[in-house]
């Protein structure tokens, strides 16, 4: 079957976990709690900004800005173990570099609800007593 799966792109994203627990555990082990709290607060703000930027670029049909915002979101999300956000951002980035067709709209529309779910899961993990 090679490098590609027979799974449709939306199904592939749906199978992606919200969070990379091993990466979050590594962050918790390597940083003091106060630093971690500050980093995650900044992550929340920056993620909100990047998702807003993606929506703005999509509304303007600006492929360059859309790809750039998605690239930044993908990298940041990947660095913090936000797997599904990173996967969606990667798909948006790749699609924006090819063509701004309406198929992109579904992934862009999914970003905010996936971020809300991811943020709730992240907050539950970072605020839990069993860190």
Image (cartoon, rainbow, N blue to C red):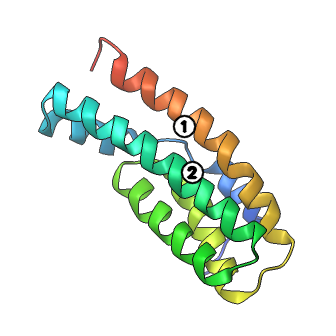
Residue lying farthest to the bottom in this orientation: 98
Q: Is residue 73 above or below residue 1?
A: above
Task: Describe the element under mark 2 as helix, strand or loop.
Answer: helix
- Residue 20 visible at all: no
Where does the image place residue 59, in percent across and percent down from the top left? 77, 67
Between the residue at mark 2 and the residue at mark 1, the CA separation in whole angstroms equals: 8 Å
Q: Is residue 4 above or below residue 45?
A: below
Looking at the picture, tell me which residue is in the foreground, 44 or 74: 44
Looking at the picture, tell me which residue is in the foreground, 42 or 95: 42
Q: Tell me what residue is drawn at x 55 percent, y 44 percent.
A: 17
Where does the image place residue 31, in percent across and percent down from the top left? 14, 36
Instruction: Rate crowding at label 1 as few (under 14), some (14 to 19) or many (20 or more) other CA atoms within 10 Å.
Output: some
Task: Describe the element under mark 1 as helix, strand or loop.
Answer: helix
Q: Tell me what residue is drawn at x 39 percent, y 58 percent.
A: 76
Query: Mark 2 vs mark 1: which is more N-terminal?
Result: 2
Image check: 44 left or right of 23? right
- Asked if the residues shown at circle 2 and circle 1 are in contact, with their CB atoms under 8 angstroms apart, the answer is yes
Which of the 4 image quarters holds residue 6? bottom right
Residue lying farthest to the top in this orientation: 129
Instruction: Rate crowding at label 2 as few (under 14), some (14 to 19) or many (20 or more) other CA atoms within 10 Å.
Output: many
Q: Is residue 126 above or below residue 35?
A: above
Looking at the picture, tell me which residue is in the foreground, 23 or 89: 89
Image check: 31 left or right of 59? left
Where does the image place residue 75, in percent across and percent down from the top left? 41, 64
Residue topped by disc 1: 118
Q: Tell me what residue is drawn at x 51 percent, y 29 percent.
A: 121
Residue topped by disc 2: 84
Residue lying farthest to the right in this orientation: 102
Specify the label residue 106 is tagged with: none
Q: Tell me what residue is drawn at x 87 percent, y 72 percent.
A: 102
Where does the image place residue 72, in percent across and percent down from the top left? 45, 67
Q: Quadrant of the N terminus?
A: bottom right
């Amino acid at each position: 079957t090679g490098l590609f799966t027979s799974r449709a792109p939306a199904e592939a994203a749906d199978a992606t976990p919200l969070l990379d627990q091993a990466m979050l555990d590594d962050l918790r082990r390597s940083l003091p709690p106060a630093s971690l709290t500050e980093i995650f607060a900044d992550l929340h703000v920056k993620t909100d900004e990047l998702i807003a930027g993606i929506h703005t670029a999509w509304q303007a049909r600006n492929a360059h800005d859309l790809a750039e915002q998605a690239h930044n979101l993908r990298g940041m999300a990947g660095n913090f173990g936000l797997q599904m956000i990173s996967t969606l951002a990667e798909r948006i980035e790749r699609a924006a570099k090819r063509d701004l067709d309406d198929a992109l709209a579904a992934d862009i529309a999914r970003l905010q609800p996936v971020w809300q779910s991811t943020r709730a899961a992240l907050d539950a993990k970072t605020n839990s007593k069993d860190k």
